[in-house]
Image (cartoon, helix red, strand yellow):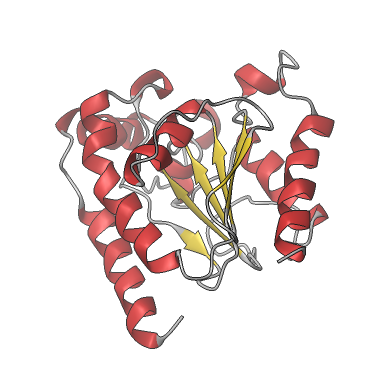
Amino acid sequence: MNSSEESSLHRINETVIQCKLCPRLSNYIQEIGKSKVKRFINEDYWAKPLPGFGDVEAKLLIIGLAPAAHGGNRTGRMFTGDSSGDWVAKALFQTGFANISTSQFRNDGLILKDAYIVAAVRCAPPNNRPSPFEISNCSQYLLAELNILDCKTKVILALGKIAFNAYCKANNLKGLTFGHGAHYCMGKDKTLLASYHPSRQNTNTHKLTWQMWINIFKTARSLISDR
C-alpha cells in the first residue's frame, strides 16, 4: 500500500469517528458512555463510532457485526474488552495474525500481522440489532475500506450473517448463502469465508465451539499461504 492509500484509510477512520448519520445509535452509545455498568463505573467510555484497525497490508480482512456496548464502545477498539474480543485475539495469535493472545484495551500492545478488522456497523446498536437503515448508512465506510484494502486482501472473513450480507451488498454479489464454514471463490486469488459470530449467545450455547472457531482461522491461514 502506498502512502496515498494509507492516508485515505486514515481519513476514512477520522470520518467514521465523527459520524452522526444514525441518531438512534449516536444517542445510544453516548447514553451508555454516561450510565456505564457497575464493573466499569470508573472508566471513561469511548462512546463514539469505531474505526477499523490492523495491518494496512493485510491479506486477511475480518468483518464484524458492530462494537459491543461495553466492549468496543468502552475501549475504543473493535473486539476489545469483551468475550468476543477474547476469542478473536486468541485465534489470531494462535494462527500467526497477532503478536499477543489478548485484546483488553486500546494501546495494550496488540499488533495485528497481515490482518485488518472492520465492521458492518460502527456504533454499538441496542440489543446488537442495527436497523437496515443503519447498516445502509455504514456501508459507505465498508465500501471505501474495501476499495483501498482490496489490492492486498486474499481472504475476507465475515463474522455473522449481517457482516456477510454487508460484504455481499457492497460488492454487488447475489445468490450467496451464509453458513458457518461456507466459502466462495471471488476470483483467482480471493476467497469469502463465513463464520458464526463469537458472541456469547453462540459460544455459551455451543452453537460455535472453540474447535469450529479456530478451524476457520486455520482455513484462512491456509488459503493465504497457498497464494
Q: Is residue 146 above or below residue 196?
A: below
Count how many numbered circles sit on residues in the image. 0
Relative to residue 183, is residue 8 drawn left or right? left
Residue 18 seen in this snapshot: yes
Residue lying furthest front in this view?
A: 188
Q: Quadrant of residue 13?
A: bottom left
Q: Is residue 6 above or below residue 114?
A: below
Residue at 21% over, 32% down: 27
Q: Is residue 62 above or below residue 96?
A: above
Give coordinates of residue 167: x percent, y percent: 42, 42
Residue at 62% over, 62% down: 108
For the C terminus, which image quadrant? bottom right
Q: Quadrant of residue 101?
A: bottom right
Relative to residue 166, is residue 202 drawn left or right? right
Residue 43 seen in this snapshot: no
Q: Nearer the viewer, residue 77 or 97?
A: 97
Q: Nearer the viewer, residue 124 or 104?
A: 124
Residue lying furthest top in this view?
A: 205
Q: Quadrant of residue 33?
A: top left
Residue at 79% over, 48% down: 218
Give coordinates of residue 36: x percent, y percent: 41, 31
Q: Nearer the viewer, residue 2 or 32?
A: 2
Q: Nearer the viewer, residue 30 or 128?
A: 128
Residue at 27% over, 43% down: 138
Give coordinates of residue 8: x percent, y percent: 30, 73
Give coordinates of residue 76: x percent, y percent: 43, 52
